[in-house]
Each structure stands twice: as structure tokens, then as C-alpha cells.
Image (cartoon, rainbow, N blue to C red):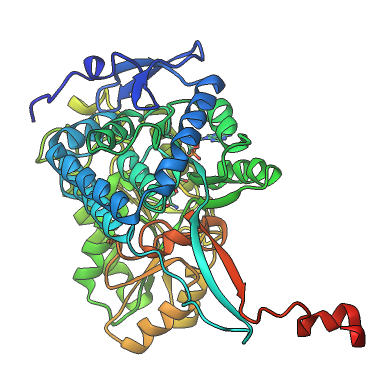
Amino acid sequence: MTHRFQVRDRFADGAQFIAGRLRPGTSGRAHAVVNPATGEEIHSYELAGTADVDAAVTAARTALPGWAGATPAARSDALHRFAAVLSDQAEDFAYAESLQCGKPIRLATEFDVPGTVDNTAFFAGAARHLDGVSAGEYSGDHTSYVRREPIGVVGSIAPWNYPLQMAAWKILPAVAAGNTIVLKPAEITPLTSLMFAQAAQEAGIPDGVINVVSGAGPDAGERLVGHPDVAMTSFTGSTAVGRRVAEIATATVKRLHLELGGKAPFLVFDDADLEAAVHGAVAAALINGGQDCTAATRAYVQRPLYEAFVTGVAELMESVRLGDPLDPATDLGPLISHTHRDRVAGFVDRARAHARVVTGGGAPGGDLKAGAYYRPTLVADAAQDSEIVQSEIFGPVLAVLPFDSDDEGIGLANDTPYGLAASAWSRDVYRTGRATREIRAGCVWINDHIPIISEMPHGGYRASGFGKDMSLYSFEEYTQVKHVMYDNTAVARKDWHRTIFGDRC
Ligand code: NAD
């Protein structure tokens, strides 16, 4: 893959997109964007400070009346044009995403970018489909109807694992519903969020509707959540930071949407197609280097298939090619940073005392030594209550445990604080039906694990948060419904006034 553009040139004006133009931050602190495949600096920019957040919120507030007042058709047209611009720039987006995240270019080209274009096209259509109960004379004496209205200025905070898709998931339902937005991407991966906002402007979405502040969590992030003119906080990230965000948002009485961590179980019953389960587990554990909130992280395999599953997964993991993310032949790139790689390694190293590291469990050497690489890792026979089974690792590490009865398998699948996603593997419709009913997670796949689609909701249960991204369900987060009630009687002394005046009515 040839280098499509020089990042330094493209963002020479700064990494804050406010009121339709790039500008430098004013925090006085520089931040380096690093290519995790090499450890080299790609770009250095000045982080957003609280003054930049305030300026972005002002821009969003200024743009709000015009955008909220536009017809659904006008917003829809703009979003259709936006999808076309994104599609035209697909290769640039894939390149920048791969560069800043270490994401294999094949994944960026075949998943992140087309998924984002499709999401944009979906919300272009959905912008004309804000629904509710029909108007009617529910009381007999009045006509009632519902207005579905935007909430106002939305403040969104996103993580680094899928920067482009997370920007899209936050921005699209918000603006389709008539809100304006200030997005704070993770400071280590701001590039494609900025490009996304620029593409929206190119498509004719008015200045100020979409603003991006590239800043650190504790200052720019907390200012955005606590800002009095921000009506809603939409946060995707870890459960620990989500708790802090919830505290600040609650103190300022904001609408809150939290998409938090996950620890997805992968439940294999003894009548499953073993080959499908083995392939599915490796793909679902390693996608995006395992830095995926829905990645398969805990495989529970019914005893008769257990050893064959362990052998099959280990063999397949060993066939995965680590390499340069920009090489289309590469299956797996580095993790997001050296610090994160060391954190992942720490989980595996601590597990060695009580579990079996079947394959992986270390960084590759040779040409890949300088990057934040970690080999695909399978850890067998860990205890259910151990750290490697209970905590979110966010790396290419799959734990595998045996189970005996169906009751036990479903119980184990539910036995972490998280509830984002899960899968069950069986040829028996009654077993899979039971799994879909009893596993407590926002998504349950049957005989697959990972696919997402614009029309369907994504969101967690329990410590994985609440609220939905994508689909028409996301409008429940980004709109508020107003009941309008007209009196139809034209009577001054209404029947219900008897509750106050009694017989004097
Ligand atoms: P993180 O929680 O460390 O950071 C997420 C964002 O919050 C970043 O933009 C960060 O700058 C910001 N932030 C940090 N401290 C803050 C503060 N005090 N106030 C306001 N903002 C603050 O998460 P991460 O490491 O970037 O991403 C990985 C996590 O995201 C994992 O836990 C993963 O499961 C989760 N995730 C969840 C989903 C989902 O849909 N549920 C999707 C992707 C990632």
C-alpha cells in the first residue's frame, strides 16, 4: 500500500475541528500520534483544553436551531451526500485508520470503512423515520400526539479501538435526529474522526453541526461531560471511566448513554459443528487484535468436544500471520501501544501460575520487535473466578474452560459483571433458543460471533452499560418525546375540575 498522504501536512492547521475549520488546541500540551507497528511518531498536535471544548460547544449551540429546524428530508439529503463523500475517500480513511491504530489494512478496508459508509447511508434513510404512537383521542375529550424532538447539543466521548466507526456510531444518530454534536475521540487516535467531520462539511452539513475536540480525558473529556450547555453525554469506553463520566453527567442532570466494556462468552454445546466453532472462535477472539468490546474472550466447551477444540484453536491461532498492518497479506497487526501490549502480557503471565498457556503468550521477535505485537494466545483450564476469565484484557487472548451440563454452561456464560455480547454454538434449536433467552447480554449470536449490521441495535446489559448504538433504537437515546394534548370540548368547567371544586364545579 502506498502512502496516500502525509498526516503532518493534512493536519498542519491543528487537530481541533470547530465551527467548520481545523485549528490548533490551546492547552499548551503537545501529544504525539504514534504508529504502533513501528513505535514511530506520525504526527504531533496540541491537545484541546477546556477553552477549546467551550468554543466547540458554542459552535454546536449556534448551529442547533438551523439544523434542528431543517426538514427531515433536508437532513437526509445531506447524510446521503455524506455517505457518497465517504465512499469516494474510502482508501484515505482505511490508510489513516490502519496507520494510527496498527489495524490490518484488510480489516480497515473490508470492515471499518464500508461499515461506516453503510451506517451513514442507513441514517440518511432513518432521518425520515422518527416514529411514535399515532395521534388520537385517548382521553375522549382531548387529542393527543407525540412530538419527537432533538435533545440539543450532544457531547460524545469515544475510544481508540475503532476510531472511525465509533465516531460514526456517535455522530450519525445524533445529527440524523436534529441534534448538533461535539465529539472527543481518544487523544491517541484523532485522525479519522477529524477526517469524518471534514467529509461531513464537504457534503454540505453546516458548520458547527459536527465538531471534534482532540483532548485528554481528565480535562477536555470532563469539561465536555460537565458543560452546562451540553444536554446529553454519550460515552463509549471502559467501565471504570464510564463510572466517572456517569457521576459528572448525573451531577449536571444530563441524558446519559454508556457503551462500556465486555467479556463475551463463547458457549459450545457438545452437538456443535466443531470446525465452525474452532474457526469462529479464532476469528472472533483475534478480530482487531482482540481489541473489540464484543470479541470472544471466554470459550466454554462441553466436555466431549473440549480437547479437540483446544487443539484445533491452538493450531489455527499458530497459522495467523502477524506483520505490517499496511500489507494486505497481514492477518494481525500490533496492539494499540507498547503500554497496552505490556498490560495484556501481564494478564497472561499472571495466569501461568494456575492455568495452561497452550499457544502464544509472548511478543514475536525479528522484524516485528519494534512494534507493539503480541502473539495469539490460548489459555486453557483457568478457574472461573480467576482474573483472566473475569477481567477485560482487550488483546488477542482467549481463555477456554470445560463444562458438563447445559445449566452449568449457561451459568458460567452469565458469571461476570459484563453483558455486552455472547454466542452459542449448537445444531439443536431448543438449546440455542434457551441460550438466547437466558444469556444476559445485549446481543446473542447463534453459530457465529462478531457480525454487526446498521439496522440492528448494539448495546450492553449490566456493567456493559445502557442505551443503543445503530438502528432505529438509537433514536430513543438521541431524541426526547413530548406529549401535546389539545382540549376538544371548549368547556370552561371541565369534568376533572371536580377533583378541586367538588359539587361547586
Ligand atoms: P477508556 O475508557 O480509557 O477511554 C475512552 C475515552 O474516554 C477516551 O476518549 C478517553 O480520553 C476518555 N476519558 C478518559 N478519562 C476520562 C474522564 N475522566 N472523563 C471523560 N473522558 C475520559 O477506554 P479505551 O481504552 O479508549 O477503550 C477501550 C474500552 O472501550 C474497552 O473497555 C472497550 O470494551 C470499550 N468499548 C466499548 C464499546 C461498546 O460498544 N460497548 C465499543 C468499543 C470499545
Whether residue 389 can be seen here? no
- In-image side of 172 versus 78 (left or right): right
Residue 214 pos. (x, y %): 42, 26
Q: Is residue 96 above or below residue 439?
A: above
Quadrant where the image shows the C terminus: bottom right
In the image, what residue occupies the spot 45% across and 19% down? Answer: 47
In the image, what residue occupies the spot 49% across and 56% down? Answer: 149
In the image, what residue occupies the spot 39% across and 27% down? Answer: 19
Residue 188 or residue 321, whichever sits in front: 188
- The part of the image, by quadrant, that contains residue 208 is top left
Residue 321 pos. (x, y %): 16, 42
Toward the top, the furthest residue is 28
Residue 320 or residue 61, whichever sits in front: 61
- The part of the image, by quadrant, that contains residue 502 is bottom right
Residue 477 or residue 61, whichever sits in front: 61
Whether residue 461 can be seen here? yes
The image shows a total of numbered marks equal to 0
- In-image side of 202 versus 490 (left or right): left
Residue 262 or residue 206, whichever sits in front: 206
Q: Is residue 137 above or below residue 124?
A: below
